[in-house]
Amino acid sequence: MLSIVAQDVKRLDRLVTDIARASHIEAETARADLDPVDLGQLVFELTRAYAPDDPGAVQIGFAGAKPENAIVWGQAGPLGQVFRNLIDNARSFSAPGGRVTVTMELVRSKGEAFIRTKVEDEGPGIPPENLETVFQRFYTQRPQGAAFGGNSGLGLSIARQIVTAHEGRIYAQNRDEGGARLVVELPLAGQGKV
């Protein structure tokens, strides 16, 4: 019984922490000044920070060379949180020894330029009817057998909140070869809304 209570306390603690983080981010992005952020450098270094010591752990890798001139107007802290949330989410759906791949490209379309970043996993994918629902607060649907209470259901909601505040967009897709793809598009510095 004490073990069950301890698990519930940990879950509530994680939930309260995530709710507080969401409120803090909302206030921070509303009042802070925007600076040029080298998104290529930020995401490249972030993926390197996930290098596991255990070869059986989920591998996080940046595909391709570090992008040059991938500059957006924003706040480095919240933008880093977006990609930590996406990578952590992808990792949680990956089997031991699986791989999470991060890619980034500069896209020019209809007179706009933006940076598209993809975080892809090899997990079970997202039920098609939930491709939008996954961004709602407190939504979480874990694979059968996953530990209950390990996720608050706020990570992707927080990511969307930050991306929207940076005049970008975020969406989910399923990969043809299996697994999920989370996509973030942010306007290149000097460009308009995506």
Image (spheres, rainbow, N blue to C red):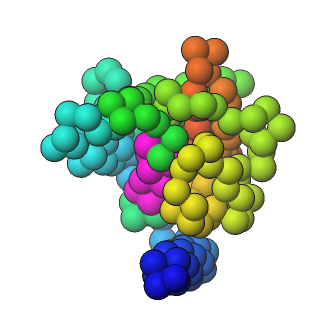
Residue at 54% from the left image edge and 50% from the top image edge: 146
Closest to the observer: 145 or 60? Answer: 145
Residue 103, given in percent of the width and then of the height, sits at 43, 28
Residue 171, given in percent of the width and then of the height, sits at 68, 40
Residue 164 appears in the picture as rendered: no
Q: Is residue 83 magenta?
A: yes
Label total for image: 0
Classify residue 177 as left or right of residue 34.
right
Residue 138, given in percent of the width and then of the height, sits at 69, 65
Q: Is residue 153 above or below residue 88?
A: below
Q: Is residue 47 magenta?
A: no
Residue at 50% from the left image edge and 27% from the top image edge: 122
Residue 32, given in percent of the width and then of the height, sits at 50, 75
Residue at 20% from the left image edge and 34% from the top image edge: 55
Classify residue 101 as left or right of residue 149.
left
Q: Is residue 181 above or below residue 144?
A: above
What residue occupies the far top of the structure in this picture?
A: 177
Classify residue 70 as left or right of residue 141.
left
Closest to the observer: 144 or 56? Answer: 144
Closest to the observer: 10 or 109? Answer: 10
Q: Magenta stretch?
A: 80-91
Classify residue 31 as left or right of residue 60.
right
Residue at 24% from the left image edge and 48% from the top image edge: 49
How would you classify the magenta stretch by its main secondary structure?
helix
